[in-house]
Image: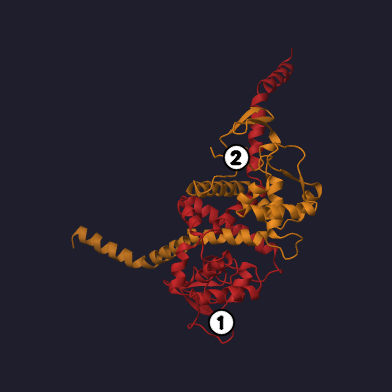
Chain colours: A red, B orange
């Protein structure tokens, strides 16, 4: 037997002997593939989100919770029913109705601060803020709080990436994008506690920069 | 000036000189904190999920899409209206109605395979599978496909962790949990292409093991 033949036979034996391990390896890869495939992840994400906003014993409907949450997180350029309609993917009529109901409940009020005479801006009242303590989404927030900082950052980054990619693929269909100053190209830091928005030509206090903005444009 | 005094003064000067950098560092930390805080992530997750299942021009309602998707991904123990009701967080009546509509549309049919005489099992038909090609969620699936394998795996793992933690915090309130064989404690691999479920005492083909199961129990 020449040495090349020996090695060929040796390889055949090796393959036969390790065949079981090879199959196991392929099975493991298959499981991982199935677990990490995009359809499963998309399903999981939607399922998790849906479960998180549901509550059997809740004073508000899920659309009302979504609106109250939006007005609590949005900045002064964005706290308008029409902007909420765009964010929530609903009609302006439905959004106005939801806002009206929240005003009647005493959770939202027409802003006395900013008024450019064109459109009404709404603020969350003290009792609106208190109501948010029983937001069904709090349970997910608490679960996220239990994650390690690394995992939370990784999750946030990948969700922002997905959000950006989804928005880019819809470019032209939808003009309004949402985000915060920290990764918006219109934002410049102008001092230790202040920033500047070149889109609205407005000075911003540091506590405004983490609010959701409808004039956002990703860096 | 004694050397200790020199060093004290030196430190004061250093602090004054690097004060600007320190403030910048604190600001950066503040931005990161605000970006990665749990409320923002929860909001982002819900927003992304909501956008992903919406479609202005769609033959089916979002509940019907959710049902069709569920029956396409669920295993033979789980393809029942009552199980979908539990998964989707809706009433049995509403779930039955949704299934009925999908049967009338030719997208679901009563299974002829498994029948234990107790409850009806439904399968997705060929035209149901074809309809799923225009599932609004496909856009999110495509976006996820564009992520690197590492990012996709990290996202999947963190979503599974969140799902497990949410389920644990609801323990007792809700008995049905959903998952797949790969991380279920009832599953044993019995051969290269087969497995065994100790909960249902059933042999499983490899292609069944990636289906969603209502008898799932996390390892």
Identity of the residue drawn at 71% across and 16% down = A6
Q: Is B187 on the left-hand or right-hand side of A129?
A: right
Label 1 close to label 2 by CB (< 8 Å): no
User: In terms of depth relative to the viewer, which is nearer, B58 or A187?
Assistant: B58
> In what element is the residue under mark 2?
loop
The picture places residue A83, in percent across and down from the top left corner, at 60, 74
The picture places residue A54, in percent across and down from the top left corner, at 56, 58
Subunit that carries the residue with mark 1: A
Tag shown at residue B215: 2
Task: Give the quarter of the image for residue B207.
Answer: top right
Q: Is B66 on the left-hand or right-hand side of A197?
A: right
Task: Give the quarter of the image for residue B195.
Answer: top right
The residue furthest left is B2
Which residue has dot 1 on it?
A120
A125 shown above or below B21: below
Identity of the residue drawn at 45% across and 69% down = A129
Q: Is B41 on the left-hand or right-hand side of B90?
A: left
The picture places residue B20, in percent across and down from the top left corner, at 39, 68
Identity of the residue drawn at 73% across and 20% down = A8
> In what element is the residue under mark 1?
loop
Q: How many marks?
A: 2
Quadrant placement of the N terminus of chain B: bottom left
A13 shown above or below A131: above
How far separated are the C-alphas under marks 1 and 2? 51 Å
Q: Is residue B137 visible?
A: no
């Amino acid at each position: 037997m020449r040495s090349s033949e020996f090695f060929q036979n040796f390889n055949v034996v090796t393959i036969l002997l390790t065949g079981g391990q090879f199959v196991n390896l392929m099975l493991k890869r298959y499981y991982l593939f199935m677990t990490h495939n995009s359809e499963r992840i998309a399903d999981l994400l939607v399922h998790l989100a849906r479960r998180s906003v549901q509550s059997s014993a809740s004073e508000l409907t899920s659309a009302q919770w979504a609106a109250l949450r939006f007005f609590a997180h949005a900045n002064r350029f964005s706290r308008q029913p029409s902007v909420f309609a765009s964010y929530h993917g609903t009609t302006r009529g439905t959004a106005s109705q939801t806002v009206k109901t929240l005003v009647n409940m005493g959770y939202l009020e027409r802003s006395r601060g900013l008024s450019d005479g064109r459109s009404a801006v709404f603020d969350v009242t003290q009792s609106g803020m208190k109501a948010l303590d029983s937001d069904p989404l709090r349970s997910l927030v608490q679960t996220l709080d239990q994650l390690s900082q690394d995992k939370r950052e990784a999750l946030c980054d990948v969700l922002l990436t997905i959000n950006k990619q989804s928005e880019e693929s819809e470019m032209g269909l939808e003009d309004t994008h949402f985000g915060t100053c920290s990764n918006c190209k219109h934002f410049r830091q102008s001092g230790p506690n202040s920033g500047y928005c070149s889109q609205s030509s407005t000075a911003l206090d540091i506590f405004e920069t983490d609010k959701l903005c409808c004039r956002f444009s990703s860096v």
